[in-house]
Amino acid sequence: MTVTLADVAARARVSPATVSRVLNGNYPVAASTRERVLRAVDDLDYVLNGQASALAAATSDLVGILVNDIADPFFGIMAGAAQTEIGGPGDGSGRAGGEKLAVVCNTGGSPDRELTYLTLLQRQRAAAVVLTGGAVEDPEHQTAMAAKLAKLAEAGTRVVLCGRPPLPDGAAVVAALAFDNQGGAQRLTKHLLSLGHRRIGYVAGPLERTTTRHRLAGHREAMRGAGAAGDEDRLTVHGSYDRGSGYDATVELLRREPAITAVVAANDTVALGAAAAIRDRGLRIPEDISVAGFDDLPFSVDVVPALTTVRLPLVEAGARAGRLAMGKEDPPPGGIALIPAELMVRGSTAPPRG
Amino acid sequence: MTVTLADVAARARVSPATVSRVLNGNYPVAASTRERVLRAVDDLDYVLNGQASALAAATSDLVGILVNDIADPFFGIMAGAAQTEIGGPGDGSGRAGGEKLAVVCNTGGSPDRELTYLTLLQRQRAAAVVLTGGAVEDPEHQTAMAAKLAKLAEAGTRVVLCGRPPLPDGAAVVAALAFDNQGGAQRLTKHLLSLGHRRIGYVAGPLERTTTRHRLAGHREAMRGAGAAGDEDRLTVHGSYDRGSGYDATVELLRREPAITAVVAANDTVALGAAAAIRDRGLRIPEDISVAGFDDLPFSVDVVPALTTVRLPLVEAGARAGRLAMGKEDPPPGGIALIPAELMVRGSTAPPRG
DNA sequence: TCTCGTATAGAAAGCGCTTGCTACGGCCGT
DNA sequence: ACGGCCGTAGCAAGCGCTTTCTATACGAGA
């Protein structure tokens, strides 16, 4: 049926061992022999059996990248950057040695699927795993995750967190790159406050997500700092990280408090929905209501008016995570790095009327 | 080191064969024995070695999804939908049998990486492969791809094309789901023509991509049909499928022909860049210049003015591709299906001035 | 000329799992 | 009461590769 090493060996009139060595290039083989083998490989269209190879060598060329929502560019950008660093040859030695299969797995934000994918990757004895995006804060799930990651690490899988805070109970991971969500959110709200806003609605992400909590915390911290707190719960609506959710939440916000002068959204996509809701209500942005997002996704600069937001260096972070996963870069001190978030002031925010 | 089947067997005081059968549930095992085995599995935290299992059983639970650009929601949406259909349990039998590892691979639109990933998947003896998005039309690459896909199919891998035209030389694939790019583009341009536009700039995608060619063909067909052709080459600028490219191309278009009254972009993302360029030039949309996109990505309805575009049923197509890859759905007659594209007229297009 | 180090190739033992076949009771049919 | 069958469990042969150890052939040093 399929061509095996033995077939190649037979055709090249050498032993399977020699073929293996030629293919792996980790053992001296006479040039003439090598050539004969390579020709046979070519003639037969031989393709290595990855599973057999991995089994025998106890290694794997699989690297998993877990994302919450693959349709969201936030994750796509990070995953793409990570994959670029991981995949393909060219890492160090001239030889095409480190050819890894970087694969991204879409958890859909579901804790169960997250665990399932980790198990699947564990089955495959993945060389590394990169977890991106916020974590679910359910204690039970956190315990399960910690245990799973510990198992993975124990089995030699390099675990890297990207855009996710370190595990609560001492990380069994290579490194954790956490975004400064709280600081960024705080600066964003401060910007709004400095413009004169006081009644600021907040469209938060799903409950029990670290990202949601940290951004909201930053926002409230800023509000409190300005003595503008008090109405927090009433002016906060939770939803998922998508456009429709932003729309609905904003409608609700305007119902609860028609006098708000600004809406801060959990991320840019949500901000888009929020902006749509505001316009559908006949209000202008930013004259009547200011809108701000988070992440600075590529489209944010192009919408009208351009979205004030907080820029997260997704490409850089993803690439770094990829390098860390491959062991091409040393982990930050303590295994933890806080990735700074930069406030991007654009046209969607302005002083409130009057 | 790691726990093996044999360890579990020893602890449960049965043979490895029995453990295997309990785990796979494909052979009668006495209830008491099964329970003993399961307890041992639990006690030992045993995790199946996927490679060994795959090797022995000559099967694989890997399914590859190739995308051109994972940061582009166009692909993210399709891949996500496909992955949902493929991954996890719940497909048919009550048992958690069909647990596949659906992984998405980012080719970055590079033919080489595309081939590399296919080889990697071939190495892993992938159960199925889904290729999404337009193909590169370089003859050499096409030949290589055809050969590769034939090999994969021969080895039992189910190959599905999603949003990609069938291979030129008779498909060695399970199914090809092709978008009606040409028809959609034609309808879009006809819409513009019917509004009265005649000088229409076209921001095309990269050369040698089927998607680019088909959309452009539809556009030109419409132009010719209206007797508005002639200036085609001068009013067409090629670029990549991203925002910056749309911006630059539009600047160039306006330089070449300041009198254009509409710009059609290769896709929505490019349209966003085009719109930005137009606005930066001090022109209004759609009063001065109409803008149209393609794909109807989620943000398109939210930008201002809302983007006239052509809707592609990405979720449905991706899901269907996933089902086809899993053999959960019968392929369309002839293995080829043309996915319709629907014109979405919104605020970014209007009759030209005067 | 003989021995020994060096370079190269092969033999063979697994890696951890699956599965066809065999073995062994106990139950049924006659 | 005996042969045969059914329901279970084990044996053992691989799956296709890697790698250690061993064997061979050479040229070099003595």
Image: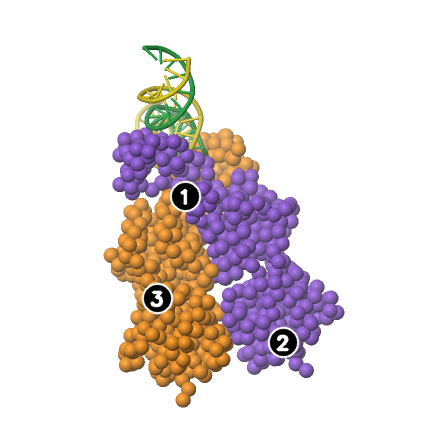
Chain colours: A purple, B orange, C green, D yellow
What residue is at 28 percent from the left and 54 percent from the top?
B140
**Drawn side of residue B43 relative to residue B341, left or right:** right
For the residue marked with disc 1, what is the amino acid?
Answer: Ala
Q: Position of residue B174 (x, y in %)?
A: 31, 55
Residue type highlighted by circle 3: Thr
Q: CA distance from mark 2 to mark 1?
A: 54 Å
Res B319 visible: no
At label 3, counting other C-alpha atoms closer than 10 Å, the crowd grade (few under 14, some 14-19, many 20 or more) is many
> Which chain does tag 1 point to?
A
Q: Which residue is mark 3?
A: B212
Q: Amino acid at mark 2?
A: Ala
Q: CA distance from mark 3 to mark 1?
A: 33 Å
Q: Nearer the viewer, residue D7 or B260?
A: B260
Tag 3 and tag 2, C-beta contact below 8 Å: no
- For residue A212, above or below residue A2: below
User: Residue at coordinates 38% horizontally, 62% vertically from top-left?
Assistant: B317
Q: Which residue is mark 2?
A: A350
Give x and y (percent) for residue A49: 37, 40
Reading the image, the residue beneath label 1 is A96
> Residue farthest to the bottom?
B354
